[in-house]
């Protein structure tokens, strides 16, 4: 059983170094090329994707589509879910990371970025479009810790991804730095005081080979 985790290619926010969260920013030209290369790597590794999961943000959606195209799997079902969205950075969203570090200090910023339970300053208002209209408003955060992000990712694993794997499907999950960090922490049982060591580079496919109990046999980074 194969699970492929891929963070989206470089986004405009990655390039310009600001907090993104649920902002719907696009890929850069570099990010597009990274996504295509990720798909080629998956194809060269003789991996045959059966189903894909994406966030509802276009940097994830576009990356997944390019991966599927390059790996000859454009025909497979794709499921978009808010549960794979990037961690919501609250009032930090849209702010330059260097400016925030100067204001709050590098140690505090490190806690917000890499800690498990550290919650950023909350936003008073979410100005989202219709993609969230069908979602219970109580589920829409105004800021999240990594722990809170994990809690919304786990139902997707339990209800969708794990059953697909148990059905012998090769599953692509195209998420974001923190939604994937949360999933990796869960899958690899990483202690919460070590989550800051989990690094998810842009568009670097992580391939987990699992047994019938969904225990990890092997992990490869393509």
Image (cartoon, rainbow, N blue to C red):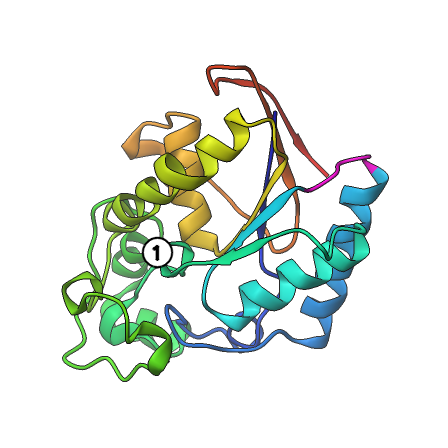
Q: Out of 153 and 167, give the one closest to the viewer.
A: 167
Q: Which residue is located at x 60 percent, y 26 percent?
A: 168
User: Magenta region, mostly helix, strand or loop?
Assistant: loop
The segment highlighted magenta reads 45-49
**Residue 89 image position (x, y, % from top left):** 29, 66
Left-right relation of 97 to 123:
right
Residue nearer the viewer, 32 or 64: 64
Is residue 47 found inside the magenta-colored segment of the image?
A: yes
Q: In which quarter of the image is residue 143?
A: bottom left
Q: Does the magenta stretch include residue 66?
A: no
Which residue corresponds to mark 1?
Answer: 113
Coordinates of residue 17 in the picture (x, y in percent):
49, 73
Q: Quadrant of residue 119?
A: bottom left
Left or right: 12 as drawn, with respect to 95: right
Visible residue check, residue 197? no
Is residue 138 in view? yes
Count of picture labels? 1
Q: Residue at x 73, y 39 (%)?
A: 222
The correct choice, above or below, for 171 with respect to 130 in the image is above
Q: Residue at x 40, y 60 (%)?
A: 85
């Amino acid at each position: 059983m194969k699970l492929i985790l891929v963070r989206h290619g470089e986004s405009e926010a990655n390039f310009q170094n600001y907090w993104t969260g649920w902002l719907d920013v696009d890929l850069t030209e570099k990010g597009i090329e990274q996504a295509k290369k990720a798909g080629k790597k998956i194809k060269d590794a003789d991996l045959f994707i059966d189903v894909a999961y994406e966030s509802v943000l276009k940097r994830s959606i576009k990356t997944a589509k390019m991966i599927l195209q390059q790996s000859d799997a454009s025909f497979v079902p794709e499921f978009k879910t808010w549960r794979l969205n990037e961690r919501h950075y609250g009032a930090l969203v849209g702010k330059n990371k260097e400016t925030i570090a100067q204001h709050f200090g590098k140690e505090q910023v490190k806690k917000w970025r890499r800690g498990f339970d550290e919650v950023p300053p909350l936003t008073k208002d979410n100005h989202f479009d219709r993609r969230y209209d069908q979602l219970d408003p109580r589920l829409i955060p105004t800021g999240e810790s990594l722990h809170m992000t994990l809690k919304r990712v786990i139902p997707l694993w339990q209800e969708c991804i794990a059953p697909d794997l148990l059905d012998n499907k090769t599953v692509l999950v195209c998420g974001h730095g923190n939604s994937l960090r949360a999933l990796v922490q869960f899958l690899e049982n990483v202690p919460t005081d070590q989550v800051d060591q989990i690094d998810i580079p842009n568009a670097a496919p992580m391939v987990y080979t699992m047994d019938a109990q969904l225990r990890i046999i092997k992990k490869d980074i393509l």
